Image: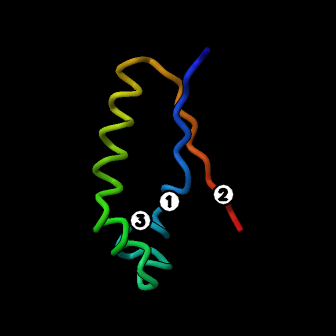
């Protein structure tokens, strides 16, 4: 079995304080949950294992 990491919707409009929907609570919630800190940690671990990483943007 091959493992890979899928990163979903880490786009500035959602996770940056100046993003277009930041005022709707997306940024605040991402900060509260430590989403970017945890994602950075997981990404570093995945890359250290030379596993594939697939950034995915789900547009709707």
Callout 3: 10 Å neighbours few (<14), some, many (20+)? many
In the displayed structure, 19 sits above or below 40; it is: below
Residue at the far front: name it. Answer: 1
Residue placed at 33% from the left, 75% from the top?
A: 28
Number of on-image labels:
3
Q: Mark 3 sits on what residue?
A: 15
Residue at the far right: name it. Answer: 60
In front of the other: 13 or 38: 38
Marks 2 & 1, CB-CB < 8 Å contact: no
Q: In which quarter of the image is the N terminus?
A: top right
In the displayed structure, 33 sits above or below 4; it is: below
SS at badge 2: loop
Callout 1: 10 Å neighbours few (<14), some, many (20+)? few
Marks 1 & 3, CB-CB < 8 Å contact: yes
Q: Quadrant of residue 32?
A: bottom left
Residue placed at 66% from the left, 57% from the top?
A: 58
Residue placed at 49% from the left, 79% from the top?
A: 21
Q: Quadrant of residue 3?
A: top right
Could you tell me how far apart the alpha carbons at marks 2 and 3 are, in whole angstroms? 14 Å
In the displayed structure, 31 sits above or below 45; it is: below
Marks 2 & 3, CB-CB < 8 Å contact: no
Residue 29, given in percent of the width and then of the height, sits at: 36, 71
Q: Mark 2 sits on what residue?
A: 58
SS at badge 1: loop
Residue 38, given in percent of the width and then of the height, sits at: 31, 47
Q: Mark 1 sits on what residue?
A: 11
Q: Which of marks 2 and 1 is nearer the N terminus?
A: 1
């Amino acid at each position: 079995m091959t493992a890979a990491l899928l990163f979903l919707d880490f786009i500035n409009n959602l996770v940056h304080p100046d993003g277009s929907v930041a005022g709707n609570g997306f940024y605040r919630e991402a900060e509260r949950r430590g989403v970017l800190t945890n994602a950075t940690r997981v990404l570093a671990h995945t890359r250290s294992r030379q596993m594939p990483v697939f950034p995915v943007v789900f547009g709707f």
